[in-house]
Amino acid sequence: FGFDPQRARDAVKRLAAEAPAQLAEGFGRIVREASPERLEQLMRSPARKPLLDGIFWQLPKQLDGGQAKGVTSSIRWCLTGRSDAEVDTYQLELENGQARIIRGADGPDPRLTITLDAVDFLRLVSGNLDPMQAYFKGQIKLAGDIMVAAKLSALFRMPGGGPGTAGGTTNGQH
């Protein structure tokens, strides 16, 4: 039973490749199984900022460069529901197959602003909230070019969410 370095590297690469999908699946399950009160409590706690920062930090890594080629847009996310009544703001900048996140409202004027409660945002990015239903129920408010919102889901590959799903949504599963 000799140690095979190539086999070990292959095993580590395989585990690393599978980890995002496993994490996304686990995150989706945790959000789905948590009570609304527990999610509300979480999003009013000190864990809110690192949790949101982590989600937005991952977002550019999920951009489908092929789908996003030639796309230049700016999307501002305004997340409500903080205990101090303030709003957390993140801006997604898309430019020719690349994405970056700006924390705060210091970015350029957005083409689209998406406003929703942070608990609903967790449900959205974990695949537990259908964006169209949420929009028609008033849970998601859009301002600006709503066609950008319609194209958003096709630009991202979210682990565990199926192909072409933003936040693991629009794959018909709730």
Image: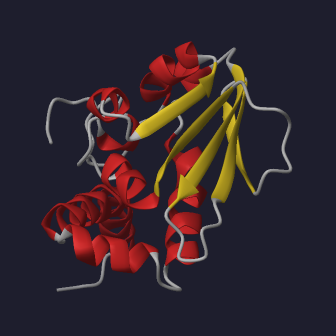
Q: Quadrant of residue 32?
A: bottom left
Identified at 42% across, 28% down, the residue is 153
Q: Position of residue 174 (x, y in %)?
A: 15, 42
Q: Name the side, left or right, on which 76 lies relative to 171.
A: right
Asked whether 84 or 171 is in front, the reply is 84
Which residue is at a point 31% across and 42% down the rendered structure image?
A: 168
Which residue: 55% across, 18% down? 146
Left or right for 5, reference 3: right
| Residue situated in front as seen by the camera: 111 or 58 | 111
Scheme of colours in the image: secondary structure
Q: Is residue 1 above or below residue 123?
A: below
Q: How far from the left and from the top, in percent, is residue 147?
A: 54, 13
Q: How many marks?
A: 0
Q: Is residue 163 above or below residue 35?
A: above
Instruction: Using the rendered view, name the quadrant where residue 63 is placed.
Output: top right
Nearest to the observer: residue 21 or residue 84: 84
Residue 1 location (% of width, % of height): 16, 86
Question: Which one is in front, 159 or 139?
Answer: 139
* Residue in the picture at 49% in, 18% down: 151
**Quarter of the view holding residue 16:** bottom left
